[in-house]
Structures are given as C-alpha cells and as structure tokens.
Image (cartoon, coloured by chain):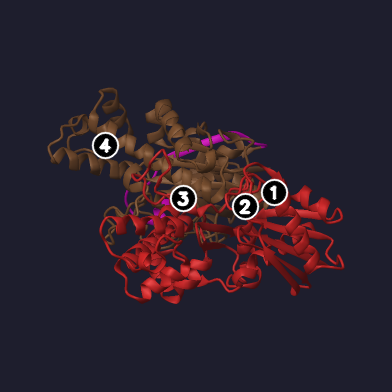
Chain colours: A red, B brown
Amino acid sequence: MASLGVDLGGTKIMAVLVDDGEVVAKAKKSTPKVGGPSDVLDAIASVVAKADPDGRADSIGVGVPGPVRPGSGVLPLAANLPGWDHAVDVAAGLSERCAGRRVVVDNDVNVGTLAEVRFGAGAGVDNVLGVFMGTGIGAGLVLDGTLRQGPRGLSGELGHTYVAFRDFDEAQIGRGEVEDYAGRRMMESRARARYEGGEPTALVDLVGDGRMKSSTWEKALAADDQVAREIIDDAAEVLATALASAIALVDIELVVLGGGMAERLGEPFRAHLEARLEARSFAGASAPVRAATLGDIGGALGAALLLERLA
Amino acid sequence: MASLGVDLGGTKIMAVLVDDGEVVAKAKKSTPKVGGPSDVLDAIASVVAKADPDGRADSIGVGVPGPVRPGSGVLPLAANLPGWDHAVDVAAGLSERCAGRRVVVDNDVNVGTLAEVRFGAGAGVDNVLGVFMGTGIGAGLVLDGTLRQGPRGLSGELGHTYVAFRDFDEAQIGRGEVEDYAGRRMMESRARARYEGGEPTALVDLVGDGRMKSSTWEKALAADDQVAREIIDDAAEVLATALASAIALVDIELVVLGGGMAERLGEPFRAHLEARLEARSFAGASAPVRAATLGDIGGALGAALLLERLA
C-alpha cells in the first residue's frame, strides 16, 4: 500500500509518495507568503497531486509547524504561515481538496523524529529524542518505539523547557527557555545587542541589517569571531543542559540532532554537545548525539509513517 | 488474587497485602541501620511474613530507593541503606527468603506515583507526574496510563533536571539541579550558609547543630522567618520551572505533590506552586497540582500494583 507524506514548512511544502518503505516520488513548492489558510491548503493539495497524480495513496499524512491535539487534525496557530492566526482543521480542509481521502496531521518535528527512528540516525533505537535547530528549537520524542504525542499534542517542546529559572520575565522577553539561547532568532538578538553595546562582530559585518542565516554563523565561526563563538558555546551548553534534563526525566538512549543550524555547525558542534551532555548527565547516564541523516526529506517521510498506525 | 507490596525506605519497611483492590493487611518495621544488604533483605522477608502469614500472595512487588533497570530486580546503589554500596539482586535475594515466590522490583517514587494514579489524587487521569519532596526530590511518570520506567530505569529523575545552566560545578557541589534548591538537605545547606554569613534564622535557632526536619521549616515559616521564606519561595520557583519543562517535554495533565516536606508546607505551598507553574507554562498549557492522598502507604500499595502487569 502506498502512502503520501507532506511536510508543511514556513518556506516550502514537500511531499513524498512512499511504497513498501521506498520513496517512489517527490514534489515541492514554495509556501504561499500572502493570503490565508485556504491558500496554504490549496498549495498542499497541488503538491499532493504532483507527487501522486494517479491517486495511489489512499490517505495522506501531514506534518505541520505547531502542536496538534491527537486525532484532531487541527493546527491552532502558526506564526510562519500567512494569516494562520486561528485554529484551522487541516485534516478536513485537505481531505475536501483531495477527493475525500483520509488525512492525518501531526507536529512537523514529531514526524521528523519518527522518520529518523525508522529510516535514519535512530534506526534500531527505541527511546530517542530528535532535536532540530533552526529559527527556534523543535523536538520530538519516541518512547519504547512509539511517537509520544501527549494528550494535548504538546510533547517534545524542548525549546520551551527552562535552563535558567532566574532569567524569567513575565513579559516573555527571554524567559530562560532553551530557545532564548539556542534558537537562531534569539541568537541573532543576542549578537545584535552585543554589537550595539560596542563589541564588533563578523555576524553583523556579513549581513548588515539583513537576517543572520545558519550560513552566517558558519562563516563567522570560520573567521574566528569571538561573539559568534561565545553565543554558540552558550547554545551548546544550554542544549546539553536541556538534554541532560530530558534524559533524567524520561530516560532517552539516543539524541538525533538535525535542522539547518546543526547541519551548518557540523561535526565540531555535535561532538562538543555530546561531551557537554556527558558532563551534565545524572549518574553517567548520558546518551550519544548522532547527526540526523534524512535532511529536509525527513518531515515528509515521517508524515507518511503516521499512516502506519491506521493500517 | 491477593498481591503483596513492600516499600523499602531508609527509615522503615512497610508491607501491604492487597486483595481485590483493598488493603487487607499491613505491617512495618524499622530499616536496619547497620549491617549490609542481606540484613535488609532479612528484614523485608520478616515484614512480608507479618503482613501475609498464610502466604496468600503468590508474588511480591518491592519499591526501592534507587533506579532499577526494568526486569532486572537489581538495586545498584542506595545511600540510605546500610552497606548498600554495590549492586544487589533484590528480586533473587527476597525470593529465596520467601519460599521462591516471584519478586518484582521498581523505584519507590515510580510505584508511589502509580498508586496515586490508581487509587489517589491522580485517579482517572492518564498523564501524571508524581513529585515527592523530602531529603531530595523524587518523581514518577505515568504516560497514557502506563508507568514510564525507561530502558535504564532512570525515568522520573526530576530532582536531577536542571534549572540553572550557569550554576554548574563539575565537582558536583551545586550543579544547578532541582534538588540543589528544592531538596531539604540542600535547603538546609543554604540556610546554614546564610546563617554563617550573618543572617539570623529561626531554622538554626530551632535545631542548633541538629538536622532540620520538615517540621523545622514549617515552624520557621509560622514564625515569619525571612531566610526560611526566601529559601522556600526559591524551592517553589525551581519546582514550577522544572514542572513547566516537564509539561513542555512530555505533556502532563496533572501534577501530584507528595512527600514529607510537601505535607508540612501544606496548602499554601501547593497553591503557590500551581500559580507559578501556570505563569511558567508554555502557551498556557499548564497542569493542576493536587496534594497526594495516600500518604506513606502509597509506596507499598504501588509496589503491589506492579504485579498487575504479570497477571
């Protein structure tokens, strides 16, 4: 039986058609920048039609950028999708556009983690935390071989776990959460604050007023930039801290590290993170950190895997 | 079918005989203060014989003060048991002393949480974190109605999760872990350090060089002691932070708060903790905090419940 998986991202929509565990077709297009949820749903439907023109898959899995209550198919809010400021039933809206086929929806990093556990860096391991570093920090949990969703679909929000209980501001400008130190958007804020405080940095020299991308950080590190080095070392320390906490709380055997930022920072960052995690871990019960291997196809592949549970 | 549960604590050993979900007999005795593991196992066997003289239970569940790898029956180390400085097979040792009956072993706070979910404050809730405040901080997780053990039996080590990533000392004197702020032993260290630094406190007036007990903290609060108040407020803030992180990571619907310290601090502490958790929670996804209702029988009752999985 073929199944179709879609990864709905803020930048692009990707779809894969999977048959017998093999990707037999792929398609993608840019995510609409303007309009609203119905434009996004139209775009998903067109990518689905491109990847599976003959309708071989009888149901569709979708990974979306936000928490999804299990079984609901609803994405409540999505800051990086146009006009998505209210809850939208993705399952119903997409099914309507795809000949009434069944649609299952889950969080994008949850399904990305599921894919890594089945086909990627986590293959053969039953208790895995997948961490994805990008604009923010996303994560998914596989426990005893099963994707943990949680009753409200909140599971895996590692970016919103705390590493600094005194750095808490009720106004939510830096609440001491992981994302406040290890998410690229907040890392940029920190770099700009230091620059404005009189510390020169290649990060600002490289992009001026433009957005700092993962490649910007990579270049600044290559140029031995002190500000970039310190902010990235803090990000590693914060992630190590949060991962050690996650291991202590749920007992994880393996961390899979992915996302654009992790890819750019590469092996030195992975190795440093693993060493810091080892130092932080309770009673030596650490976990290895492996680089994700599926790249940007992981989300769509994992979405296709959601359908396994229906079989 | 009757089942027998034992709670092996640093102070006392308790056993309950459970038949059809009802406690039909209880027994207890003090934990040996000297000797070694075989003396402790002898003491457990004598409590078992007292609670179930006719051998009605055909298997025995034991909650022990340390992590247990699932299925192993082995308690590696236990700081508060005499001579327990190496791994001991509790299941085999106790079975030998109890006519070859089958023995199942798990962590004490894991089974305490299980008991609260079946018969206590968590009844009817499927995703529960049980937190027990005493000398240290123990916790257990029930996810989707099942006790989470983890592949190494480490699950639920909330006391070893981090709330302060910069307060990290490789020498392990305060690593920024929850227990460093919210465990009674470390709270006492903080109070004594402040006293020695010139801040008078009822805590030291009450006990002199003796150990500060939960009742000492209760009395100091009643006397409006500033040092006690600040240390306890910090403990609440730290716990709220760690609980908010736990909710974000695994999506918990309810926190059950137990242990001697929580009992003494009572309703004001519970209500304050719940409010701080609400403030800390990601996207308003908080969880109520309920006081544990089973008291010191919870551990033994939960140990009896371990046997359900064998039925």
Q: Which residue is mark 3?
A: A161
Which kind of residue does numbered mark 3 sit on? Answer: Thr
Spatial separation of the CA atoms under disc 3 and disc 1: 29 Å
Which kind of residue does numbered mark 4 sit on? Answer: Met
* Mark 1 vs 2, N-terminal side: 1
Q: Are marks 1 and 2 in contact (CB under 8 Å)?
A: yes
Give the x, y percent position of residue A274: 42, 69
Residue A72 found in image quarter? top right
Task: State which region is magenta.
Answer: B20-40
User: Which label was assigned to residue A81?
Assistant: 2
Q: Are marks 2 and 4 in contact (CB under 8 Å)?
A: no
Left/right placement of residue B307 relative to residue B137 reads right
Look at 25% across and 39% down and name the residue there: B211
Q: Quadrant of the N terminus of chain B?
A: top right
Which residue occupies the foreground of this view, B172 or B64?
B172
Spatial separation of the CA atoms under disc 3 and disc 4: 32 Å
Which residue occupies the foreground of this view, A290 or A287?
A290
Q: SS at mark 3?
A: loop
Look at 40% across and 26% down and name the residue there: B268
